[in-house]
Amino acid sequence: MRSIVLLILTLSLPAMVTSQEVAAQEVAAQGKETLQLTLPPVIFAVPNVEISLYFDNIVLTPTPQSLRFSVDCGIGQTESRRWVVNPKETDVGTHPLTVRVEASDGSLLGTASTKLQVSSADAGTGKSIRLLIVGDSLTHASAYPNELSRLLRSPGNPKLTMLGTHRPSAAAEGVAHEGYGGWTWSRFASHYEPQPDPKQYKFSSPFVFLDSNEQPTLDVNRYINEHCDGEAPNFVVFLLGINDCFGASPDEPQAMDATIDGMFKHAETLLADFRKAAPQAHFGICLTPAANARQEAFQANYQDTYTRWGWKRIQHRLVQRQLDHFAEGIQRNLSLIPTQVNIDPVEGYPTDNAVHPNQSGYQQIGTSIYAWLKSRL
């Protein structure tokens, strides 16, 4: 059964917002927008590790500061921009969580619910796990894989082996992955570079090889045999979607959905081959993280080509579609990692980068994946 929380409300917005002029102009042109309160089915947590739910990341509005949020949960506390919890071992278990949204005058706009799943700090002790991370530039930066490695190598955790052919200079000792700047689900499923040159950023997909007819072919089993010592991973994490959908038009919902449909087609191709090659593995799909809350960061990176409000509409729709598309797969060793709620869209980003977090934001991504892994263990 699906566990998707999607509530669509109608909210009248002011015609001008001083702090976000570009977004305000677009909203004014629309007159009204729908506020889409969207929560993942589960938020994962571990004792003594902070997890947050940032309110800006769960509603479709450029002005979350004009709304009032409250959270009803047996643990944690509500702050101005987020709900945050740092569980204790006595909190291990499942806790219902409900978000309430009000207008500035106190009128109720709506509520939505999910559950907080707190796993024991020593989950997986004595086990050995083999982890493969597949992603784009956020993974290439290696900051969140480094944080994930640090957490998993602390006491109370299983013995960790990180798989992958890519070890950028920023990767810590023992950290490897398959993360490349600008990459998409499609590129991992099909791209072949006959003359790869890492210095020129020319890479073939690590999962694509020439077959007996000299044709590029997706072959995850061969990847495992040649690059993983023939032993399949226990866990595979995918953090993709930004490059697949960044160029979609937020003003054309049908075209935007068509772009997302195309992404899912390539995602299913790659996932099918992974499932065939590693049938016992558990797959985690990261919900596409929310971006920098500052329009100035988008202006610095893209001038007038892309705006924060434009990408937020795409990213919010993409998360909704991910929740829906992968719901059935949850029954088949696939689950969703709520990376989009636990990243601070203000303090988790530098002032001049739209979609690449700072060290704090990357650590929050790593924390989300860590909590998910502990829940699987």
Image: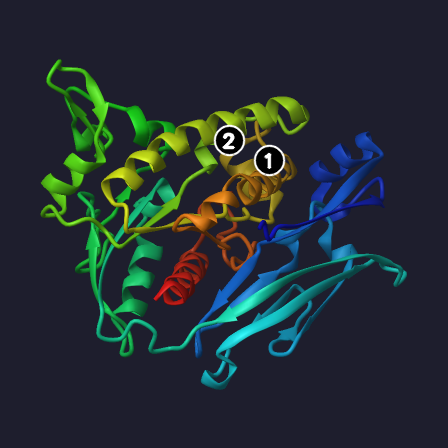
Amino acid type indicated by mark 2: Cys
x then y, percent, for residue 369: 40, 59
In the figure, residue 341 lies in which quadrant?
bottom right
**Label ID, residue 245:** 2
Residue under the point 69% across and 65% down: 98
Q: Nearer the viewer, residue 151 or 300?
A: 151
Farthest residue toward the bottom?
Answer: 90
Picture layout, residue 80 above or below residue 201 = below
Tell me how many marks there are. 2
Describe the colour scheme in one phrase.
Answer: rainbow
Residue under the point 53% across and 52% down: 340
x then y, percent, for residue 197: 16, 28
x then y, percent, for residue 180: 30, 38
Q: Nearer the viewer, residue 215 or 64?
A: 215
Q: Secondary structure at mark 1?
A: helix
Image quadrant holding the C terminus, namely bottom left
**Label ID, residue 314:** 1
Circle 1: is it few (<14), some (14-19), or many (20+) Cα within 10 Å? Answer: many
Residue under the point 28% across and 24% down: 191
Cα separation between marks 1 and 2: 7 Å
Q: Nearer the viewer, residue 171 or 183?
A: 183
Horizontal side of residue 153 vs 271, given as left or right: left
Residue 370 seen in render: yes
Amino acid type indicated by mark 1: Ile
**Label ID, residue 218:** none
Picture layout, residue 49 above or below residue 38 = below
Badge 1 vs badge 2, beta-carbon distance below 8 Å: yes
Horizontal side of residue 71 vs 102, given as left or right: left
Residue 13 seen in render: no
